[in-house]
Structure formats: C-alpha cells, structure tokens
Amino acid sequence: MKLIAFLAAAGALLATPNIRELSPRGAQRGKTFLLRVKGDGLLPGARVESALPASFSYQVPARKLNEGMARPNTELSYLVELKADAPSGIYPLRLVTADGISNVMLFPVGDAPEVAEMEAEDGDKQNGAPEQAEPLAALPVVVNGTLRGADIDMYSFAAKAGQKLVIELEARRAGSAIDPAFEVLDATGQLFAKNDDAAGIGVDSRLEVLFPKAGNYLIRVHDSKYSAQDQNFYRLKLGNHSFAEGIYPLGWKRGEDVEISFVGGNLAQPVKLRARPESRTELAEVRLPSGSTAFGFVLSGNANELEPPSLPAPLKPGTVMNGRVSKPGEVDKYTLAVKPGEQWIFEVEASSTGASQLDALITVFDQTGKKLASRDDIAAGDPALPLTIPEGVTNVTLALEDVLRRGGANYAYRLEARRSPPDFTAKLLTPFVNVPAGGTALVNVLIQRRGYDGAIQLHIPNLPKGVTMAGGHVPPEAAAQLFTTDNAGFRAANTTITLTAAPDAKMDAVNLEVVAQAEGVSMTRRAAGPALVTAVRGLRQAPVSMYSLGYDLPMAVSKPLPYTLSASVPMIRISQGFEYPIAHRMKRAAGAKAAGKVREVTAGAVGNLRVLQGPPSTNPDAGTLLLNTNFATPITRFDIYLAADAEVDGRQVTVVSPMIEVDVVPGYRLEPERTEFRTKPGGAFTVSGRLRREPTFEGGAVQVKLDDLPAHVVCAAALVAPDQNTFSFQCEAGAAAQAGQYDVRITSAAPEVGRNIKAEYKVADTAAKLTLGGASE
C-alpha cells in the first residue's frame, strides 16, 4: 500500500531522536517516579516536551553514558513529579535534542495505583499459564504489561460473592499497535466472561463482570490476532468505577453551555452534566466526574440544535442538527427547501468522533419521493454527500439511518446541510519532520476527495527563514487514468512535499501549517496532523494515529547528513510523447561510502508515465534518469523526487532531492486570430493564426484545417513547416450553401513526430463558429 510505503520512507529518512519505549507506560497522579526513555539518538540532557502536568528532572547516569556501552545514546532517565491535581487523561510526550525532535509517545495518568507486569520487567518470570498467573493482591490496580508475539499474560485475583468489577484493556488509545482481548476464567479454568472490542473505546476491551460467588479468578490477556507488534504494550485496569459507552449530543457550538448526557456502559440511567467544553482544537474532551474514559466532543462555529420530538422536521441550512437513531430500524428524516442548480453538501459526524456506534447512511429524496443520491461512508469514515440539485426539484428529504438498521442510546449523530461545491479534506501522514541542515526531508499528505476531482496545490504560509518548500501539486483525479467510475470523485490522493534547509539554518522546533488550495476554486483546507503514527502489522491494518490531539507539523533542523542529492533542474516542461533526461549528483563527505542507486518517486497518480535509468555512468556519484511520456500521458502538473539509500553511523537512511515540478504540455498550441467567421453563399473567408511549438516537441510539419463544414463549403489545409510559426488558408462557400450558423472546429495534426513513432500527434481542437448569410468578412 502507498500509505505504508510513505510511512517507511519517513521513518528511514534520518538517524534523529527516536523513542521506542517508555517505562512505566503510565502513572498515578500525585506520584513521583523514574521515567526511562529507550530508543535511538537520545542525547544526554535532552529536553522533555509534554503537556503532562509534571516536572521532569534529567538524571545523570552514574557513569558516562558512552562508556562500555555497545549502543550509546539509547536510554535516558528522568525523575518525574506528577501534580496531585493532574487531570486523568492521556498526554503526549516527546524529546527535543540538538539533533532534532523525536516522535511523540502517549503517557496516561489515572487515579488507581500502578504496577509493572513481572514478565515485562524480568523475562525469567513467566505468566503465560494458569499456574504461572501473576497475583494482583490489591484492587483497584493498573498493570503495565507487554505482549511479545503470540504471548498470553495471565493474572489472578480474588472476588467476593456478588461483587462487580470493571476489567479494561487500554492499548490503541495510548498508541499501542496491539488489538487487545481478554477472558475471565473461574477457579476450575472454565471460561466465565470475555471481551474483544468495547463500545466507546474502539478496539480496546472493557467489561463489567458480576461474580456470583467468592473465590479466585484468572484474567487471560492477549492480542486478538496473536500478532507480533513493535509497540506491544497494554494497560490492564481492574477495579470498580462507572463508565459510559457514548454521549449525547456529540458536539455543540463553541463557547456555549450545553447539557451532555453520558449513556450506556454500567450506568443505571444517563448521567447529565452541564458544561462549556473548551479546546484549542475542534475536539474537546468530556468525561464522567467519576469515570476514566474521555469522549471527543465536537466544537463548531455554527449554530447547533437538538433533534425535535417529532420527525420529519425542517433542517436549517448551516445549522448542525444533533440527533440520535434511538431504536433499531429507525430512520430520521429532515426536509430542506432548495433550488435547481444549487450545490449542497450533506455531512454526517457519528462514528468518527469515537462517541457513537452509528454507521451512518444518508439518502436524499426529492419532493416526489424519487431517490437522488445516497452514501454510507468515505474511506471508512462518516458520509459526506455532495449534490447538485436537479431541474424541477424544490424540496428534498434527508433520510438518516444505520447501515445495519441498528439503533439505541449511543447511536448519536451530527447532521449539517450547507451550500457548497464538492470539496475535499487534507491530512498529514507525516507526524513530524527533522530537516538536515543543507539537506532535504519529505512530508507526506493524504487528500480525501469528497466530490471535488480537480487539481490541488499545497503550501505552507508560516515557513521559517532558511527553509524552502517544493512540490505539493496534486493532479486532477482524471490524471490517474483509471478509466472506471467506481468511487469517482471520492478517491484518496497521496502526495508529497519536500522541505530543504539552508546549510547555516539553525532554529528551535517550530509548528508548520500545511494548507491545501483547490485550483480555480475558492476552497482551502488546513491539513490536520496525526501527532503520532504507530505502524500495525497485518493485512489491511491502518496505522494508529491521533488526529484528535490537534497537531499541525512540528519541524526542526537537524545536523547535516554526509550526503546531499540534487537534480540538474528544479522544473521540467515536457511535451506529450517525448523524453527528458534528468541528471543527478550525490555529494558526499570525505570517507562516506558510495550511496545506492538513485531512483525516482512520483508524488501523485499519473497514468502513462515511465522513468528509466539512463546510460551507465563511470562516476558512482552521478547519473541520469529518463522521464518518458507518450501521447496518452495526461496534460497535467505533478512532482517527482529522487531518492537513494545510504549508510550513516551504521544505520540505513534515505537521502532525497528537493521536489522537481513536472509540467506535461501539448507539443504545440494553436492561437487562431479569430474563432468566429462570417461570409455569404458564393463568398470566402480566411483562417489564420500562430502555431507555437514546445522546445521539447520533436515533430515536423503540422497540418491545420477547418472541420465539420456545412455542405458546399470547402477549405484548403495549411501545412506549417518546422521552421514556420504561422498558418493561413482560404475557405470558399459555394452559391448553393445554406444560410445559417454552424459549429466548426479548427483541427491540427503532426504526421511525423520523430523517435520512430508511427502515429500522428494531435492537440485538442479549437471550437469555432461559422455564419453564412449577410455581409462577408
């Protein structure tokens, strides 16, 4: 998959700070503890950057870090003092060093005492069998554990007759790659209860268990797929606390008070809380006063309303309707006055918030009940349905339901209808970037089309001095030449930009804004950052990301690489059907080994395009690639970059060039002096103009003529020789020609295009008008 390739490229780019493990994985508020950070490139004295309400004191090791160590700079320690009033939650944490910034890790804070799994601390202490179960003597407790491959961890505890305990596994919510599951066994080893994926917490697990009799019980923890993951940690929570599975409403207008109902879970009835949620991002956190699970609460700038008691009901344009599919089979309907030709987007937010189980399906009907359009999701998310109102339609009904006809208290939604052309969303796939001084780094972006199929341009408005951006051209959807209507207008587009730092660039970490602008349309979208990206092994497994944290693109300038890759040109303009050589050169520091073969990467989907290796070079640091197009290559603008693998300090890195902009253009263009011609039967007129050839066009003479002529009108064709740039030919209307206005075309063709290609080359025709009757020209 392209996404996995992007992530791999981003991860392999530089040997900058990288955190692989935190120990412990969480803490009880008000506690002081030693935090061990393990990874690579962790320079002594690195600064911790975190929203965690705590103080961090770097702990100098008893001996110099590099003495006697096979792998120096792989572990740092900090004394952490958590504030007693630190709110429960999950906090991002990263390191900042002189060599750049590290990836983000998440650190949970809660109310219960925390312990480490014995096996995780000491591999000789196994807990994979009932007789090896690790005892949990005091409850409540949080166990920080790990699963290595097809590992099983077992824990024992005592329960009283009639006692209720909540068993919860926190993994994905804290950035782990495992999909946790658990089973509860009684003293005889019989399965008593189990859970894999719980409502309100994604793929994490949770269940309240009633124990009918006193005795000892076992909890068996494992990955639901028994997969091996790099980020393989979990947090087992065992205690007695209240939890909800959803909220209603899912959001409200920013700055206004709203009553929020927490529903489901082990609540006997909904718990209502009046609040004014606040956040610098579009998603605030709300939680039960006594609960640990936080729900995302959407903050918007528009007016919000609650679903009225009786439906169907009118839907106000631009107002968010907060509703709920309250029972199985229910279909909520809203009416909206419209006009033919208007462009609308009908958008639903539900499961994407994490606080609703609704898998929404939205259908639009006209006033006669005729179905106009429907959609159930976009890229496994909530639906957004663009619609141009057909002729004769003045009123539409929006029908909203669950795809599987489910319903209940936690099947809430937010529905908005707004006047808008088809649009798109933008997301960063790169969570952060370290740009080497004097070098280049990649930033990958995902464009999700929602009906808009045109070109898009990315830019960074707050780029700091000393750093330049290149690329960011997203070709129109048609440039991919998929020749299928499946999901047309709603396909995703991966693209890349490059950031290049001047050799003397020095700066602290900055937060960059990446903005996507539709071409020819007043439509911009700010690209949301994922905060972190955790790869998940397995078939069709999406990486773990945290767009809800409200990150943009953190960037720092890191130390120079001993390699710099450059191309001979920053921009290429090439005619369809021809070839362009791209010379490249690798500059390497003294003593650096030769890098691997230079390859090309196209940042976007473009059909009928090839890049080949050029003639062999005797210079290991130089060579040529050949950019090949054919007559079917789309006329479009896109980007490519060059890449090569090299070794730095024993680690493989990918060295990249700045992005190269490529414009594929017609081999020539016609510029007629006029496109409207007039004469009378028996008269004549002249067609003339200029022909401008591209420098890369290798064709010979070009024939120009006027086609689709009415009866009794004839024209001579013009043959424009290779050394000529104008054309002119005469047309005559016979006396029998019928008066009237006719649509005609100025056409052209180059029969000889060189390169042994046995096909003529044509550019798009020019539409023209011919009027017969009245005065001649």
Image (cartoon, helix red, strand yellow):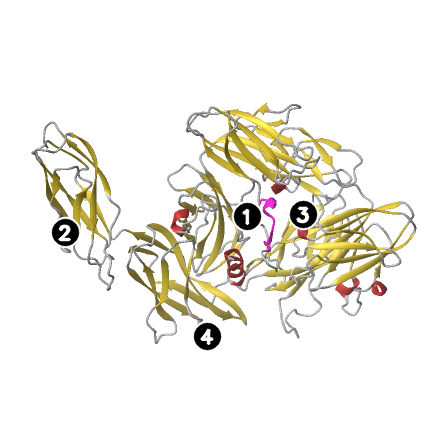
Q: Is residue 547 magenta?
A: yes
Q: Label 2: few (<14), some or many (≥20) within 10 Å? A: some
Name the amino acid, label 2.
Answer: Val
Disc marking residue 623: none
Q: Nearer the viewer, mark 3 or mark 1?
A: 3
Whole-Å distance between the Cαs marked 3 and 4? Answer: 47 Å
Earlier in the chain: of badge 1 and badge 2, it is 1
* Residue position for label 4: 593
Name the amino acid, label 4.
Answer: Lys
Whole-Å distance between the Cαs marked 4 and 2? Answer: 54 Å
Q: Position of residue 715 (x, y in %)?
A: 12, 43
Q: Secondary structure at mark 4?
A: loop
Q: Nearer the viewer, mark 1 or mark 2?
A: 2
Q: Is residue 743 above or below residue 561?
A: above
Q: Secondary structure at mark 1?
A: loop
| Residue at image point 69% right, 33% down | 327
* Residue position for label 2: 720
Disc marking residue 529: 1
Q: Which residues are magenta?
A: 541-550
> Is residue 136 in sight in this rendering?
no
Name the amino acid, label 3.
Answer: Gly
> Is residue 225 in sight in this rendering?
yes
Q: Nearer the viewer, mark 3 or mark 4?
A: 3
Q: Is residue 212 above or below residue 96?
A: above
Q: Are marks 3 and 1 in contact (CB under 8 Å)?
A: no
Whole-Å distance between the Cαs marked 1 and 4? Answer: 36 Å
Earlier in the chain: of badge 4 and badge 2, it is 4
* Residue position for label 3: 202
Q: Is residue 653 magenta?
A: no
Q: Label 4: few (<14), some or many (≥20) within 10 Å? A: few
